Image (cartoon, helix red, strand yellow):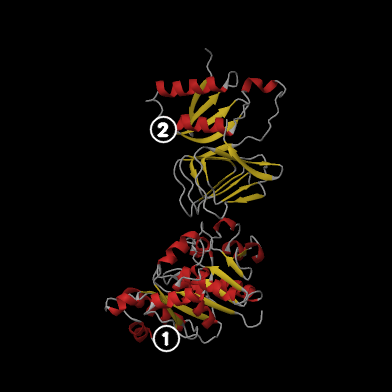
Amino acid sequence: MESSQVIVITSGKGGVGKTTSTANLGHGLAEQGYKVCLVDADIGLRNLDVVMGLENRIVYDLVDVVEGNCKLRNALIKDKRNENLYLLPAAQTRDKDAVQPEQMIELNRQLREQFQYILIDCPAGIERGFKNAIAGADAAIIVTTPEVSAVRDADRIIGLIEAAEIPAPKLIINRLRPDMVKKGDMMDIDDVIEILAIDLLGVVPDDESIIVSTNRGEPVILDKHSRAGQAYRNISRRIAGEDVPLMDLSSPGLLEKLRRLVGGK
Amino acid sequence: MSDLVTFKGDKAGLRIILSAEAELSEVFSQLAAELSNNRSFFSEGSSARVYTEGRILQPAELAELAQILVTHGMTLTQLEVKAPAKSKSRPNLQPLVSPPVGAKVIKRTLRSGMKVSHDGDIVVLGDVNPGSEVIASGDIIVFGTLRGVVHAGATGNLAARVIALRLAPTQLRIANLIARAPDEMISLPDRPEVARVQDGVVLIEEFAS
């Protein structure tokens, strides 16, 4: 497909929200009408299928495709809510060594023929799984939380992304708590940006509804009342090139009430 | 009482030969009795190969056999249907319905990422967790909760069955048919169930032996 883009979503540290971000941004882009494929590169510790509620549909996986056990189209799972969105699941009973970076490049080449956006959910760490996930990516999104340890790992990852000559990685700051920032108990956006010095793609507020939606296998972006969902919607529009201002996180109550009053999105 | 159970030992371990001359329940009770009486003779954790004299065990019977052995600290490693030596000269009056199969017994819970496959039946004495996979050319019997992916009759046997104390698989395949769990949360069944193929669809019903 002309003008297709492979974007790797990575963080270094585990548990900061790579998989949640991948699932939500995939939905966000597909809602805008783009053909989107999500690739779970976390072989042996797959989660993206669970978060998207598609686990029970898996028959073939990424490793089956690269080993030639099946055709790519046999392994692709169509999302149950959005027909523009597909998932290529990881194998669970294998490990990272089952795939070579060259095979990922070839896989991306095939996916580019069918999809406009290919989002790769990268495993935590900087070893083989990371190298597989960034192989052949055109762009990178770094996810971090406003914690010193997560930011430290994000910094390391940005260095590796630059060394791999992937241009201009973008940053998502996840799970920000404005009340804690206000009290000086949490790093604020500027603190994080000052250290990492890359473009900010968006900020996702901490939101309990994420936990609920993740457990149910329904990405939070589908919940029109969730602030995290709104943040992901904004970020996915920015990925598509739209200029969307940052959400005002400081007055959640009022904004939320207004949105509900208007009855809109 | 004639000997319904014969024990033989060789380099590879213990062989148990089950007679075909009596009701299976009788044979099983004698097996259990023999094992209890000679408890010191059969060392804990040893493996047993079981031979039947032309009798083909049903999944439930196989599970019962495995349970008897496990109770006495033994693992069933092989099951063979073998005609007794003396009957060799006789014409084979009872052709085998299915080819001889050995059962694989797994005495542990299968966790996410584990995969077991076997040409024959598989008996799991434990749970099968989500993210794990069990693939058998024959039946799959789980003495525990089945939440993972199972494929019975993987080489195309539509008569294969899946039995579990609690049957709640992510995905259940028999031969070339695939059934998946409903997307809505459902409560766990509270009694053993069996999945089998009927009229080209996978049917799940309460297990009645």
Does the rendering let one see residue A262? yes
Q: Is residue A208 above or below residue A188?
A: above
Q: What distance separates the C-alpha of mark 1 from that of mark 2?
A: 62 Å
Q: Chain of mark 1?
A: A
Q: Nearer the viewer, residue B9 or A41?
A: A41
Q: Amino acid at mark 2?
A: Gly
SS state under label 2: loop
Q: Chain of mark 2?
A: B
Mark seen at residue A95: none
Residue B135 in the image, given as x and y percentages of width and height: 57, 47
Neighbour tally class for label 1: few under 14, some 14-19, many 20 plus, Cα within 10 Å: some
- Identify the residue at image location x=51%, y=22%: B6
Task: Identify residue for label 2.
Answer: B73
Q: Is residue B88 left or right of residue A56?
A: right
Residue reaching furthest to the front? A261
Q: Nearer the viewer, residue B14 or A52?
A: A52
Q: Amino acid at mark 1?
A: Ile
- Identify the residue at image location x=50%, y=83%: A166
Mark seen at residue A198: 1
